[in-house]
Image (tube, rainbow, N blue to C red):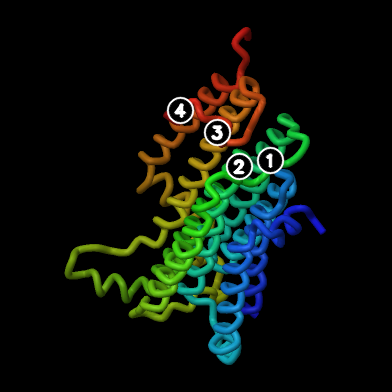
Amino acid sequence: MEKVLFIIFAVVAVLSALNILLQRSPLYSALSLIGTLASVSALFVMLNAQFIAAIQIVVYAGAIMVLFVFVIMLLNEPKGVPHIDKQRGLRFLAIPFAGLLLAEAFYVVSSVQLQQPATLSKVENPDQAFGTTWSIGTALYTHYLLPFEVTSVLILMAVVGAMVLARRDGD
Amino acid sequence: MPSGLKKFFSRDNLPNLIFTVLFLGAVGFVSYKYVWPNLERFEPTLVNFMMLSFLLFVVGVAGVLSRRNIIIIFMSIELILNAVNLNLIAFSRYFQINQEAFNTAFKSAGMTVNPLAGPVFTIFIIVVAAAEAAVGLGIVIALFRNRETIAIDEIDLLKF
């Protein structure tokens, strides 16, 4: 069961990620990105990280993608921007480099030797899962309290920066 | 036929087409020879999650490198961050399952494994992604107001 779910969600994630690049309209790309995020969220549930899965849906697929779609609608670029046509010669250089990257990645993955058993998606008692709200909240407010507080400063800076960047000069 | 597909099969795109055919052929051959016979006893392991994360990362990098639309480049960056999140969660799940073994192995070094570091770090990455999206889209709106374009090769004031 778990392997079927893993294969389904992995294939959906990769295919909709590729669809982001192949679509010409940014709106369809945003929809494909939502598909990828939802599939990765389902994989998070398989990895017993339920809270991260919920955060992924709520924050990423909810808030951030709404922001993206809002900007796409606001800019209202009538036709999609075409691909880069300059530097045609680099295209022939790209193929060996892509092959090199793939060979390197397959070498790395095939040379991984795990000392411990690596089967991840066992279904177990949800109370003992490490991704519950209780365990993450305990870690976040005790051991990682200082990074958490610094994050709030980061958010404040981002809000002020976005406001300053997006307002008109006259306002 | 969507125009993207038509362009993909056009004559200008012949190198990419050849590479894609070769790559798909290699993937099909490898999966027929090695993956398909072993599918019965397949279990999603750490290595599989690493491979999926690598694929999502590479697709994101390809999007950053190949598209002109700055909004799609932002989406590709989100995809890259999500691939990293998946890797973090898979590794922390692996550490959680084998916590005793790792703790005994690291005892001489005085270290203990904290499997909660992965989810907490993932939350921080999501927060940074949200902040980056807000500031980046603010920059896009300011640019579009001044230059009337969102194609990155026409935004070259800082190029020289």
Say whether residue B36 is visible.
yes
Q: Residue at x 52, y 23 (%)?
A: A160
Q: Quadrant of the N terminus of chain A?
A: bottom right
Residue B68: give its label: 2
Q: Earlier in the sequence, mark 4 or mark 3?
A: 3
Q: Amino acid at mark 1?
A: Val
Q: Regarding mark 1 in the picture, which secondary structure is present there?
A: loop
Q: Residue at x 52, y 36 (%)?
A: B131
Q: Regarding mark 4 in the picture, which secondary structure is present there?
A: loop
Residue A81: give its label: 1
Q: Amino acid at mark 4?
A: Leu
Q: Earlier in the sequence, mark 4 or mark 2?
A: 2
Q: Position of residue B121 (x, y in %)?
A: 43, 51
Residue B158: give its label: 4
Q: Residues within 10 Å of mark 3 (few under 14, many from 20)?
A: some
Among the 4 quarters of the image, the one containing residue A41: bottom right
Q: Amino acid at mark 2?
A: Arg
Q: Amino acid at mark 3?
A: Gly
Q: Position of residue A140 (x, y in %)?
A: 43, 47
**Can you say whether B16 is above or below B27 in the image?**
above
**Mark 3 and mark 1: Cα distance apart in space:** 18 Å
Q: Position of residue B111 (x, y in %)?
A: 24, 63
